[in-house]
Image: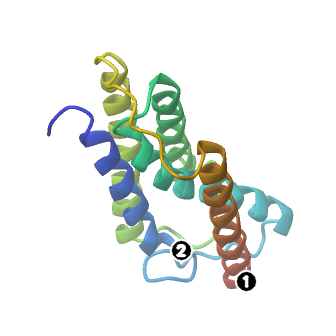
Amino acid sequence: MNARRLTPVLLILAVLSMAPLIPGGPVENRSFGHIPVAVLIAFNAFITLVVLGSIPLAALARRGGRRILVWVIADGLGYVAIFALDLLHIFPVSPTPMSPALIGFELAGLVFGLAIIGSAARDLRRPQPGRAPSRALSAGARRLILGGALALAGAAIIAGTIGALH
C-alpha cells in the first residue's frame, strides 16, 4: 500500500476483528462470573478504550503528525497486551477453556497489534505531510464531540458486556 495508508487500514481491521469477541457472542463464550465485577469493568474499560480509540486514530493517522503516530503505537501495544494476557492465561482466566475459534481470533488480534506498531513506526520515519486546510469547527470542538460520542459508546459497551457476563 502507499505511504501512510496501511496504518489506518490495520486499525480498522483490528476494530472489526473484535466484534465477534463480545462476551456471550458467537466466539467468546467463556464464564467470568468468578472475577470481581470491578476488575471486569476495569478490563473491559481498557479493551473499549483501545478499540474505540482506534477509530479516530485511523482517521487521523494518514495525515497526522508524530504525536498521532505515537498514540497509534500505544493503541497497537494495547491490542498486544489484551491478547497476550489472554493467550498466555494470565488474565482473564476462566474455568471454561478457549475454543479453537477464539484462539484463532486472538492470534489474529495479536498479529494486528504487532502490525499496527510496525506500520506506525515505519510511518514515523517517513516525511510528515503538510497540514490540511482548516475546517468550520475548531479542532477542539471536533475533539470534544468525538470524545463525547466515544465515551457514550464505551459506557454502553461496558454496561452491556458486564450484563452478559453476570
Seen from the viewer's position, the closer of residues 45 and 60 is: 60
Mark 2 residue crowding within 10 angstroms, few (<14) / some (14–19) / many (20+): some
Q: Residue at image x 33%, y 57%? A: 13
Mark 1 residue crowding within 10 angstroms, few (<14) / some (14–19) / many (20+): few
Q: Residue at image x 56%, y 83%? A: 24
Secondary structure type for disc 2: loop
Residue under pointer 2: 22
Q: Which of marks 2 and 1 is nearer the N terminus?
A: 2
Q: Where is residue 94 in the image (x, y as percent from the top left)?
A: 64, 66
Q: What residue type is labelled 1?
A: Gly
Q: What residue type is labelled 2?
A: Ile
Secondary structure type for disc 1: helix
Q: Residue at image x 59%, y 43%? A: 139
Residue under pointer 1: 163
Q: Position of residue 97 (x, y in %)?
A: 52, 69
Q: Is residue 93 visible?
A: no
Q: Distance between the residues labelled 2 and 1?
A: 12 Å
Residue 35's quadrant in the figure?
bottom right
Residue 100 against residue 72 in the figure, above or below: below
Residue 15 against residue 2 in the figure, above or below: below
